[in-house]
Image (spheres, rainbow, N blue to C red):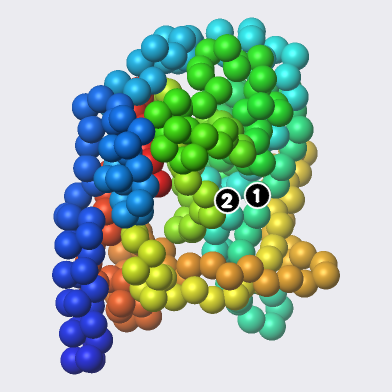
């Protein structure tokens, strides 16, 4: 339960957040000017969703076609991430003979031809196998360069607002409804463009960091055997620790009461911003 001082603090945080960010993610019907983007969103560190900013991209009409993607990337080898539940880079119980401990689990990664990877994302061969094309570190320009002509290399009004710097990294994610990313923070300005489907986001401002219950967790790695269809999760050697958010915003009905008692600042505080970014829209973070 929250103590009186904690209730007062949460009330103040809620007021500060509403004054600076409002109570929803702002939507723009058209791209802003560089000055407007810098003044109204970048400088105050305020997210927004922009419509009609990528409507000229050929990707919007080409990428929903699976045959187009498979043929264009037929010779491309890509990084495919595999987990038993779709939750990569997240906290998972690690069972050992002595006790159950929580670890930071990374996905099993295989380098496979794109057509095979796409088929596994869309048509899992086993129940407890979720495939996600989510390699970072500039993967779009490294692994998917055959698609480069389908979209702009940068967003001009954003580039100008951010000092003329071109993107340090351009990444591509292809997943299904089971693909999930746990709470985390990025160290860069992000422009997240959805080309096909939609993506759900839960967002919290930096002022809510105290509600994340950041702790150090031992790093672990999944390994997958295609022969047995089973995953193994083992701690990395040498052992290292990863600072990560302890909160699962969607606890199961069986664990919800326990989670709420462990993390009252999160569950009893201001509601996170929830937004849905649909095809043709950009989310600025």
Do labels 1 and 2 touch, CB within 8 Å? Answer: yes
Which structural element holds mark 2? strand
The residue most toward the bottom is 4
Between 162 and 190, the residue placed more toward the observer is 162
Instruction: Mark yes or no: residue 259 visible.
Output: no
- Provide residue 131's location: percent of width, then percent of height: 59, 37
- Which quarter shows the N terminus? bottom left
Say which residue appears at 23% left-offset and 32% top-offset. Answer: 28
**Which residue lies under the disc numbered 1?**
107
Question: Which of the two labelled residues, at mark 1 and mark 2, occupies the earlier sequence position?
Answer: 2
- Provide residue 8's location: percent of width, then percent of height: 18, 85
**Which residue lies under the disc numbered 2?**
88
Q: How many marks?
A: 2
Say which residue appears at 19% left-offset and 91% top-offset. Answer: 4
- Is 237 located above or below residue 32 in the figure? below
Which structural element holds mark 1? loop
- Is 2 located above or below residue 214 in the figure? below
């Amino acid at each position: 339960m929250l103590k009186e001082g904690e209730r007062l603090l949460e009330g103040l945080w809620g007021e500060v957040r509403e004054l600076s960010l409002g109570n929803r993610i702002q939507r723009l019907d058209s791209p802003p000017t560089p000055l407007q983007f810098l003044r109204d969103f970048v400088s105050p560190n305020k997210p927004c969703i922009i419509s009609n900013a990528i409507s000229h991209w050929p990707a919007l009409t080409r990428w929903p076609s699976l045959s187009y993607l498979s043929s264009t990337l037929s010779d491309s080898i890509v990084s495919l991430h595999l987990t038993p539940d779709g939750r990569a880079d997240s906290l998972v119980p690690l069972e050992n003979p002595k006790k159950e401990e929580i670890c930071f689990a990374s996905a099993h990664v295989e380098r496979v031809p794109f057509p095979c990877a796409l088929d596994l994302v869309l048509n899992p061969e086993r129940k407890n196998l979720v495939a996600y094309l989510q390699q970072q570190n500039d993967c779009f320009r490294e692994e998917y360069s055959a698609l480069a002509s389908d979209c702009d290399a940068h967003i001009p009004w954003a580039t100008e607002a951010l000092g003329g710097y071109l993107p340090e990294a351009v990444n591509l994610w292809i997943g299904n409804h089971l693909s999930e990313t746990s709470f985390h923070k990025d160290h860069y300005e992000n422009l997240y463009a959805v080309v096909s489907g939609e993506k759900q986001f839960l967002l919290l401002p930096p002022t809510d960091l105290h509600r994340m219950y950041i702790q150090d967790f031992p790093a672990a790695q999944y390994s997958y055997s295609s022969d047995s269809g089973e995953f193994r999760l083992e701690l990395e050697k040498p052992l290292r620790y990863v600072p990560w958010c302890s909160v699962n915003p969607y606890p199961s009905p069986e664990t919800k009461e326990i989670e709420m008692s462990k993390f009252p600042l999160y569950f009893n505080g201001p509601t996170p911003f929830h937004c849905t970014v649909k095809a043709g829209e950009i989310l600025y973070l």
